[in-house]
Image (tube, rainbow, N blue to C red):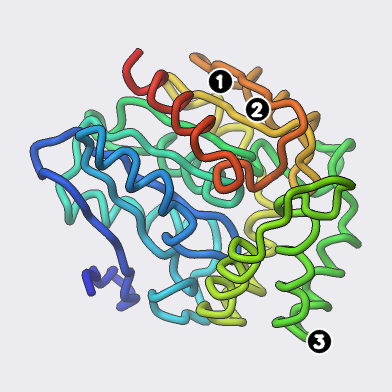
Amino acid sequence: MSKITTKDGTRIFYKDWGSKKAQPIVFHHGWPLSSDEWDSQMLFFLGEGYRVIAHDRRGHGRSSQTDTGNDMDTYAADVAELVKALDLENAIHVGHSTGGGEVARYVAHAEPGRVVKAVLIGAVTPMMMRSESNPEGLPPELFDGFRASLLANRAEFYREIASGPFYGFNREGAAVSQGLIDNWWRQGMMGGAKAQYDCITAFSATDFTEDLKAIDVPVLVMHGEDDQVVPIRNHGARAVKLLKKGTFKAYEGLSHGMASTHPDLINADLLAFFRS
């Protein structure tokens, strides 16, 4: 397996497919998943001639099960080390959910020439949790509940998320995919419980407002209108207003996991943005 070792000794697993001369696309997964979340996108864009790269965030998937450094600054620093190790230039960074926050934090501080475009899909930007600066955010008690559920029975908690709000399978008339549920659960259980516990704070309490304002490259913000995990009104619709070169695309009736439930639709829109 391909891995790099970061400055603090953490081993980061990554996939790197395609010609090293092709334009790179770097995919950033959501909590508590792994780079496997991007299978449909990586195979599609590999077929379109791109170099596709995805890593397992520290503490997730096949990377080291870290008990420290499970915060957004360190996540972004890990990405910077991966980008440098692979010598990526003019890359497109695509992040989903927590991965969207990671993209915002990394791209805002990336070395010149490293990034040409970015995409935020159902991203946690600009901020999830309610605070004085984010009065319309989600209540802190919700994330306290996440942590309590993870401590009590991580396996059952992850099963409930995957079979319910993540893909919108709790909606009447939903076309439920047991394969997606099982794959979500598999990815979640691969990672370390301590890192995933800490990551709840990283994705809920980090304020990405200044990161979004600092990004100079074009950014496509994609969000499902029926996203029950990261509500569109307080995220996609707000995030795009903070970007210098932002474009917003909302998807009627689609869920937080729309890139997996509707890959043909999402991939086509991504390709159009990449080629624009």
Q: Quadrant of residue 58?
A: bottom left
- Residue for badge 3: 152
Which numbered dot is residue 143? none
Kindly check if marks 2 and 3 are in contact, taking CB atoms under 8 A apart as contact: no
Q: Which mark is residue 243?
A: 1
* The one of 96 and 186 positioned closer to us in this rendering: 186
- The CA span between labels 1 and 3 is 39 Å
1, 91: nearer the viewer: 1
Residue 152 locus on image (x, y percent): 81, 87
Cα distance, mark 2 to mark 3? Answer: 34 Å
Q: Quadrant of residue 189?
A: bottom right
Q: CA distance from mark 1 to mark 2?
A: 7 Å
Q: Residue at x 33, y 33 (%)?
A: 92
Q: Label 3 neighbourhood size at 10 Å, few (<14), some (14-19), many (20+)?
A: few
Amino acid type shown at disc 2: Ala
Identity of the residue drawn at 66% across and 58% down: 177
- What secondary structure is marked by label 3? helix
Q: Is residue 238 visible?
A: no
At which x and y percent is residue 182?
61, 71
Query: Could you tell me which quadrant the C terminus lies in?
Result: top left
Residue beneath label 2, please?
Answer: 239
What residue lies at 68% left-to-right and 26% top-to-bottom? 251
**Disc 1 on helix, strand or loop?**
loop
Which sits earlier in the primary sequence, circle 2 or circle 3?
3
**Label 1 close to label 2 by CB (< 8 Å):** yes
Say which quadrant the N terminus sits in: bottom left
Expressed as whole percent of the image width and height from the top left, the position of residue 65 reads 46, 81
